């Protein structure tokens, strides 16, 4: 008998235990790679330009199906938030600022 420990349903990784930890970590890892590709693609580190690229390419992947897998555990929330935090920190002029102030400068909200 074949036992599946997880399966993908409409792009959301699910497990029989109805926990979405594996989905959250896989989405975060995928988005970290995408952020790296974006940063590698642009020669500039202009914060506004990079923020628009993040909102266009990365944020939809992070938010897809979030109504289903909405993270409730603190470590899951931090895993998702870490993607945005790390990307914004690599923009010019924002590296030395604390995270809330970086968000304020970009007129952005926490995920």
Image (cartoon, rainbow, N blue to C red):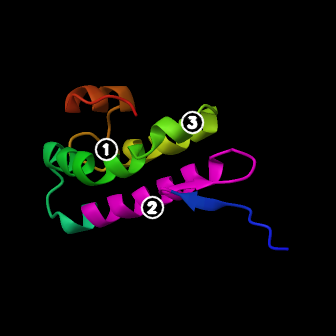
Q: Residue 88 carries which label?
A: 1
Q: Residue 56 carries which label?
A: none
Q: In this image, 56 relative to 99: left or right? A: left
Q: Residue 30 carries which label?
A: 2
As displayed, is residue 42 above or below residue 22? below
Q: In this image, 66 relative to 17: left or right? A: left
Question: In the image, which is nearer the foreground, mark 3 or mark 1?
Answer: 3
Residues shaded magenta: 10-38
Q: Residues within 10 Å of mark 2 (few under 14, many from 20)?
A: some
Figure disc tally:
3
Residue 1 position by quadrant: bottom right
Q: Is mark 3 on a helix, strand or loop?
A: loop
Q: In this image, 53 relative to 31: left or right? A: left
1 and 2 marks in contact (CB < 8 Å): no
Earlier residue among tags 1 and 2: 2
Q: In this image, 20 relative to 55: left or right? A: right
Percent x, y for residue 63? 40, 43
Separation of residues labelled 3 and 1 (CA atoms): 22 Å
Percent x, y for residue 109? 32, 28
Q: Name the residue under label 3.
A: 71
Q: Is mark 1 on a helix, strand or loop?
A: helix
Q: What element carries label 2?
A: helix
């Amino acid at each position: 008998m074949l036992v599946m420990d997880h399966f993908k349903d409409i792009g959301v990784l699910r497990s029989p235990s109805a926990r979405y930890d594996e989905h959250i970590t896989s989405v975060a890892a995928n988005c970290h790679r995408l952020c790296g590709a974006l940063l590698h693609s642009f020669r500039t580190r202009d914060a506004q330009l990079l923020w628009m690229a993040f909102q266009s390419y990365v944020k939809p992947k992070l938010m897809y199906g979030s109504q289903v897998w909405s993270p409730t555990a603190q470590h899951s929330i931090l895993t998702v938030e870490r993607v945005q935090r790390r990307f914004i920190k690599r923009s010019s002029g924002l590296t030395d600022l604390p995270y809330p102030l970086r968000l304020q400068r970009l007129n952005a909200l926490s995920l």
